[in-house]
Image: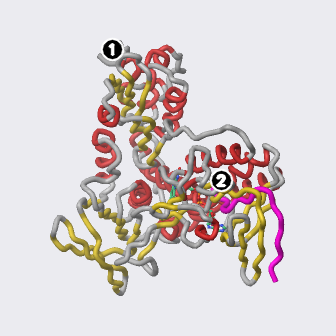
Amino acid sequence: GEFTTEVDLLIIGGGPGGYVAAIRAAQLGKKVTLVERDKLGGVCLNVGCIPSKALIAAAHRYEDAKKLGEIGIEAGDVRVDFAKVQTWKQGVVDKLTGGVASLMKANKVEVIKGEALFANDREARVINGYEANRYRFNQCIIATGSRPIELKDLPFGGRVISSTEALALQEIPKRLLVIGGGYIGIELGTVFAKFGTQVTVLEGTESILPTFEKEVLRLVERRLKKLNVTVVTSAMAKGVEETANGVTVTASVKGEEQRYEADYVLVTVGRRPNTEDLGLDMAGVRTEKGLIQVDKQGRTSVGHIFAIGDVVPGPALAHKASYEGKVAAEAAAGEASEVDYRVIPAVVFSDPEIAVVGLSESEAKEKGLDVVTGRFPFAANGRALSLADAEGFVKLVADKSSGELLGAQIVGPEASDLIAEAALAIEMGATLEDVALTIHAHPTLGEVMMEAAEVGLGRPVHIA
Ligand code: FAD
């Protein structure tokens, strides 16, 4: 028979949405039980953000090491031991997931292993192997995340792989075909290109990373070309055949059939929310196109059940999942917290990095706003030049009459970290004047933000 345990707040899923919600709820005095079927840390820590960034860092350093001669350092013959790279990457992942486990303990969150599904709106069954138990909850937060979308004509298996298998390859492939030029495809394609793989990217639309402005993309496209990455746009993959030493993919490119040979084909065409096997209908939780519908507090159509992260609408990003996790936990604890999506940064860890927040110039204009922009190049920044990494720019978009910052786009060195200042500025309602008047340490990449604000005000110091 099944045991029934009474719990207070049940959280399903231990990714950056679920585990952060668990900590915040515990801080607010809730008794929290978290169910995870696989590993704490979810996609992000185990097979997403963290391992991808570790491999990106390794590939970047390898490439940099080969170019050390340009700044007068003779490093000799630089070689890759890829198995060791993978071991190091796994060490980073293990340290972080171990950290999450410690945090659960420190916050007295009970972690249960198993797969949860709703029996009704007050009970979930948790199945672990042959064992099944029931948990009767007062409140629940659904944080079950997402998984890679599978193409009907290129099902996963063998040499047709998702990001999960690509991150775990033990050898550097000779040829890699990437289907999908979104951020995951571009990030992983760049990793292997830097390690020497011949990479081809097939993108269905007219451009890779289609949500970004052309001027931002230009530099990334140029670096991809330098890495001998072939980008084929308006290309729809049609089917795959395994060959003796790899795969052949057929695709229709601008109406013509083409064939591509590779060792592996990596399919990165988006993510699908994990909502089908949860028994949501048993609980009465409404979905639309697989995504759970929620209000500003993260409440689903059932008032005491919340949902956060990749299972709800919005960008599938870890920091968005964590943010929603905190809001839902606070709401569950009776606080008046609500989400505000005006300022969600988005980063592509391409080469160079792209980071954006708020509105782009074209988005602002589409909204009928009268804007002023300020753009400053890293080429005129002393720190960037002394890092031998001075391509790219910061562009700020502000309201013309008030000067209030509306958005920022950065392409260039450390864009991923630099975007935080713009996010804070927008969040605080800062104007171009505020950013320009803030003293930035010299020489730093951050000065480019200040100079871009000065450009917007019509009084730049370091460009004429
Ligand atoms: P998840 O992280 O997917 O966690 C859900 C958890 O729920 C999983 O552990 C799963 O096992 C568990 N679960 C599911 N169903 C059940 C069930 N029925 N019972 C029990 N447990 C269940 N985002 C960024 O912001 N920055 C990045 O740089 C970045 N890089 C990425 C790189 C790659 C290759 C990929 C694939 C993703 C990347 N992401 C990145 C996206 C990020 O990983 C996700 O947005 C984030 O993990 C979503 O968090 P979540 O908590 O909603 O779900």
Q: Residues within 10 Å of mark 2 (few under 14, many from 20)?
A: some
Q: Residue at x 21, y 70 (%)?
A: 252
Q: Disc 1 vs disc 2: which is toward the camera?
A: 2
Q: Residue at x 78, y 66 (%)?
A: 136
The answer to which of marks 1 and 2 sits earlier in the sequence is 2
- Look at the image and name its color scheme: secondary structure
Relative image position of residue 34 (x, y in whole percent) = 74, 61
* Residue 350 drawn above or below residue 189: above
Work out whether residue 365 or residue 462 is closer to the camera in this orientation and state it: 365
Relative image position of residue 346 (x, y in whole percent) = 47, 44
Give the structural element (helix, strand or loop) at label 1: loop
Asked if one can make out residue 85 in the rendered structure from this viewpoint, the answer is: no
* Residue 269 drawn above or below residue 160: above
Q: Tell me, yes or no, whether the two marked residues, 1 and 2, touch with CB atoms within 8 Å.
A: no
User: Label 2 CB, ligand 1: below 8 Å?
Assistant: no
Asked if one can make out residue 59 in the rendered structure from this viewpoint, the answer is: yes
Residue that mark 1 sits on: 458
Work out whether residue 435 or residue 193 is closer to the camera in this orientation and state it: 435
Figure quadrant of residue 457: top left
Q: Residues within 10 Å of mark 1 (few under 14, many from 20)?
A: few
The magenta stretch is: 1-16
Residue type beneath disc 1: Gly
Q: CA distance from mark 1 to mark 2?
A: 52 Å
Indicate whether residue 341 is drawn in magenta: no
* Mark drawn on residue 303: 2
Work out whether residue 344 or residue 86 is closer to the camera in this orientation and state it: 344
Which quadrant is home to the N terminus? bottom right
Indicate whether residue 8 is drawn in magenta: yes
Give the structural element (helix, strand or loop) at label 2: loop
| Image-based side of 280 in relation to 25, left or right | left
Q: Quadrant of ligand 1?
A: bottom right
Residue type beneath disc 2: Gly
